Image (tube, rainbow, N blue to C red):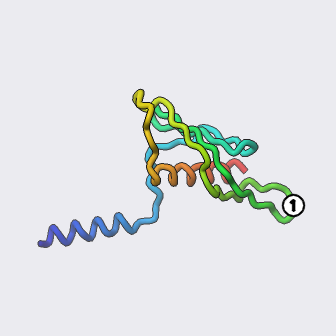
Amino acid sequence: MKKLITLVAALTMTACTTAPINKGFIVESVNTDKNTAVIMRGDMEVLIEFDARYFKDGDGYQNWRDVEIKQVTDVVVNGFDDEEDYQLSFDEVSEIVSLVETKIREEG
């Protein structure tokens, strides 16, 4: 019984953590003019197109540090162990969006 309670507590703590889970994605490049990004994971390349909202600074100039990706409009997955029909899960797309937003803010 004690082991079961410990297991339940551990699963609850894991489920409640807010730290992002990096599934091995690396943002290779981002083009803010075309709203596209290339993301790599192992031998898989993910190309995404997105709609983003960029916030302006107080002087009216673009400040790329402030960005919100509103939606991903297209996703193309290439070269995942020769599988052509690999579909990203919702969690994987969410992780990619978060990584792309972070990359844009860091490059600002």
Q: Which residue is mark 1?
A: 60
Can residue 47 be spotted in the picture?
A: yes
Left or right: where 20 falls relative to 71: left
Q: Relative to residue 41, is residue 7 depicted above or below? A: below
| Amino acid marked by disc 1 | Gly
Q: Residues within 10 Å of mark 1 (few under 14, many from 20)?
A: few
Q: Relative to residue 87, is residue 52 depicted above or below? A: below
Q: Relative to residue 48, is residue 67 depicted above or below? A: below
List x then y, in percent, for residue 99.
Answer: 56, 50
List x then y, in percent, for residue 1.
Answer: 11, 72
The residue at the point 73 percent across, 51 percent down is 108
Query: Total number of numbered labels?
Result: 1
The foreground one among 2 and 62 is 62
The residue at the point 54 percent across, 49 percent down is 96
Can residue 102 be spotted in the picture?
A: no
**The quadrant where residue 33 appears:** top right
